[in-house]
Amino acid sequence: MLDVKDWKQLNNIPETSAYIEFPLSFTGKTKNGMTSAFTSLSVSAQFILAEIHTMNKIFKEAAKLTYKHFIHKFGMSRETVSAGFKTLLTRKIIERVKQSHYLIKAAYNKKDYIEIDVYWLKREWDIDGKKKRLSRSRFLPLALLVRSAKNPNSDGKFISSQARIGKAVNMPRTTAGDSIREIIATGLISCEKQYENDKRRRGCSLFEVNPQILEVKHPNINSSSVKALFGMPEPTADELHAQLMLDTKYRWIIDRININYIATLKEITEARGEDTLKLAKLEAETAELREELENYFKIHKIKRGTFPPGFFRTDITDNKAI
């Protein structure tokens, strides 16, 4: 068992975090192996559903949740969000009451839930010296272990097996095992084999959660002051760019901008300051690409002001060699 001093130090962990209240019913978990309205939902659709549940609970009505909300908050692509909503609407799990406002129509257990901290989703975790953003499915076993560790009767420890943890979040044993191994590698939890001689607990391990994670406070979800905290945060230019790169059309524009930029620099160097026909064509292409990018922002209602001057290689500069 690890002492506190032996835990991997996690940097920039917030004191307080918004979270998603994730009812375990959304995983498709049922009693006696029966199917439910949520059976076989994708993990993305489950998270969309959990966010609708959480925000409606906060606002005490159908909250306004645009596609952009999910793109920014979860780092999902527009196609992923669209597919998730299509499934939820087609299967009549949710109902659109007005534009971007949804109610959950399918019955589910609202009391049995886990809490997934929002900062987990967008953070890059250190795994063997490399930065990596974990997939959303990894956070289901983590949230379950955090819930168990916070149980006053648990003493911060949780005895279980990969199979039992997987069953609790309706995840195959192998997937649960992969998730646990990866979150162990981040330093979020520790796992120690126990009870090999106890037939009742054979295969079980002793799990503990990094105290830094347990110390993060959750605001009262029923307080009127939490609406801003749980709403859609304004992304930085780098975050917004990374999110938009998931969209094929945007990525194609950026790829062509980069090709044009490299070709322009090469022509400037080879022409040694002379105005050539090729350079004129490249500059005209730059202007067309700039207009195409601006039109993309306009169509998708993206705040152009998020990106500072010079962020894109089509931005006007006095020195083309920069």
Image (cartoon, grey):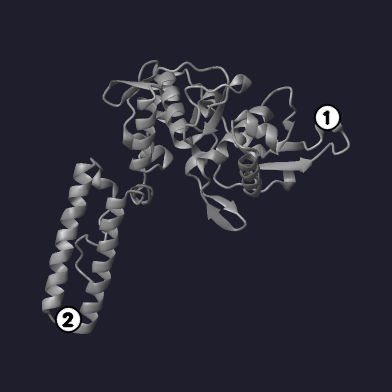
The amino acid type, in three-letter code, at marker 2 is: Gly
Which of marks 1 and 2 precedes in the sequence? 1
Relative placement, left or right, of 56 versus 100 is: right
- Name the residue: 74% across, 26% down: 154
Q: Nearer the viewer, mark 2 or mark 1?
A: 1
| Structural crowding at the residue carrying mark 2, measured as other residues with C-alpha within 10 Å and reported as few (<14), some (14–19) or many (≥20) | few
Quadrant of the frame with the C terminus: bottom left
Q: Dot 1 lies on which element?
A: helix
User: In front here: 3 or 168?
Assistant: 168
Residue position for label 1: 200
Q: CA distance from mark 2 to mark 1?
A: 81 Å
Can you give x and y, in whole percent of width and height, for residue 266 in the image? 25, 77
Residue 280, image x, y percentages = 12, 73
Label drawn at residue 273: 2
Residue 24's place in the image compared with 275, above or below, is: above
Q: The residue under label 1 is which amino acid type?
A: Arg
Figure quadrant of residue 164: top right
